Amino acid sequence: MAIRGRSRLTDVVSKHEAAILTDWLKEQLAAVKATDRIGEAELRTECARFLTLLKVALRSDGSHDVSSAAWSETRELIGELSRSRANAGYSPSETAMFVLSLKRPLFDRLRSEIGGDADALADEVWHTTLLLDRLSLFTTEIHQKSRDEIILRQQEDMLELSTPVVQLWEGILALPLIGTLDSARTQVVMENLLQRIVETGASIAIIDITGVPTVDTLVAQHLLKTVAAARLMGADCIISGIRPQIAQTIVHLSSVITKATLADAFVIALQRTGATIGRATKA
Amino acid sequence: MERIPILKMNEFLLVSIQVDMHDRLAMTLQDDLTDRIVRDRARGVLIDISSLEIVDSFIGRMIGNIAAMSRVLDAETVVVGMRPAVAITLVELGLALPGVRTSLNVDKGMDLLRSSLARGGNGHRDAGR
């Protein structure tokens, strides 16, 4: 039965390849009409390649097991497709539609070929559905994976971008923190700051938390750790930009010098390093 | 037996740790340093750990102990040149070494010692820091 089923589907695909391709394209163009992000010519090439590979795979392997070696080229092709679609901003269902929209053309051909034999037709439809479902699940999986990769990369980018250490004056560093602080980010912040302290020989670092929306006890603890590590290296830290509601959560930070604004902290830092600041008197 | 050299410079003692500290070495250093502070009547101790790459909780505590002992003997102690990785490790171990004065490099450490000596150099002054 399985052997018979395989040969029928293979025959149908081989025999009506051009017609299936046309119908399939029509299906897909109807489905993605609203989101016309891919050219028809490009879509046609992709579909034709897929059909060719499908034919080859069907002929060499009747088990419909898409994880087997015979399907590796097909897998590669739809993997590549899913990845490029994920990057182009397609939704998972739009991506899966590529494979799923092949059902109707195939079923139509199967019906016209073996319409008389209801049992055989049911078998064929079942096998074809199984095969296409597996392939579409595979596209969804790849799509998901690509999206995850994108998210991961963006997170890394943000981590890099969001922790600049700037030198305000000779011996004074500022670390403006923006966004939520978690353990991983604090680790990066801490390492960046300490590294810059070594490079610049700064004796005072101002950590500005104006851009940190919430400071819970964990974040406060992370801040304290950073301050303690900087102190061990011989640099003092000033925490500035403390908002009223944050002040209420971090009352136990008392061991650290704190200032309401970055400007106040900067003045203190200048005094500590022996510099004075004032308006030039007009002659 | 391996020892860490202690150099005398005016009323200060300089200790530069150039090798990986192991427990025995740290104990020997503690003995030698307290001896030398008393013998040389040193008023300040500068410990340079810029070559120290690895610390464990024992070495961290020893550094704290040595600083505390020197203070008892009326000598101000400054630990200089701690590497970022070492600082992070000590903080993660919960050894923030309160009471130990620190400096970025030997230059700044010497400045710190001189200025604290000029201000009357009572070693207990900073104990509550």
Image (spheres, coloured by chain):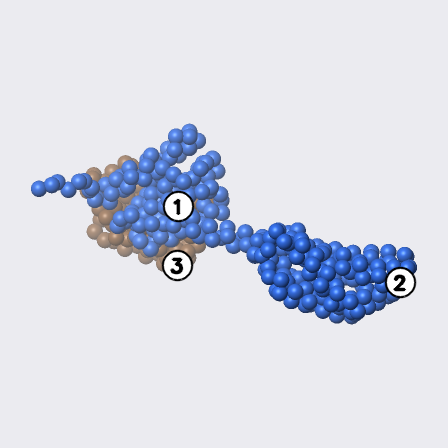
Chain colours: A blue, B brown
Question: Residue B19: which disc?
Answer: 3
What amino acid is found at the position of numbered circle 1 in the picture?
A: Ala
> Left or right: A111 with respect to A258?
right
* Disc 3 chain ID: B
Q: Give the residue number, with chain letter if any, for mark 2.
A: A1
- Distance from label 1 to label 2 (Cα)? 72 Å
> Left or right: B55 with respect to B47?
right
Q: Give the residue number, with chain letter if any, for mark 1.
A: A229
Q: Residues within 10 Å of mark 3 (few under 14, many from 20)?
A: few
Q: Percent from the top left, x then y, of residue A169? A: 26, 48
- Distance from label 2 to label 3 (Cα)? 77 Å
Q: Percent from the top left, x then y, of residue A106? A: 78, 60
Of residues A263 and A79, the one drawn nearer to the viewer in this rendering: A79
> Left or right: A86 with respect to A236?
right
* Disc 1 chain ID: A
Of residues B97 and A12, the one drawn nearer to the viewer in this rendering: A12
Relative to B124, residue B39 above or below: below
Find residue A105 and report its image quarter: bottom right
Mark 1 or mark 2: whose residue is earlier in sequence: 2
What amino acid is found at the position of numbered circle 2 in the picture?
A: Met
Q: Marks 1 and 3: in contact by CB < 8 Å?
A: no
Find residue B91 and report its image quarter: top left
- Distance from label 3 to label 1 (Cα)? 22 Å
Disc number lying in front (2 or 3) = 2
What amino acid is found at the position of numbered circle 3 in the picture?
A: Val
The N terminus of chain A - image quarter = bottom right
Q: Residue at image x 38%, y 38%?
A: A210
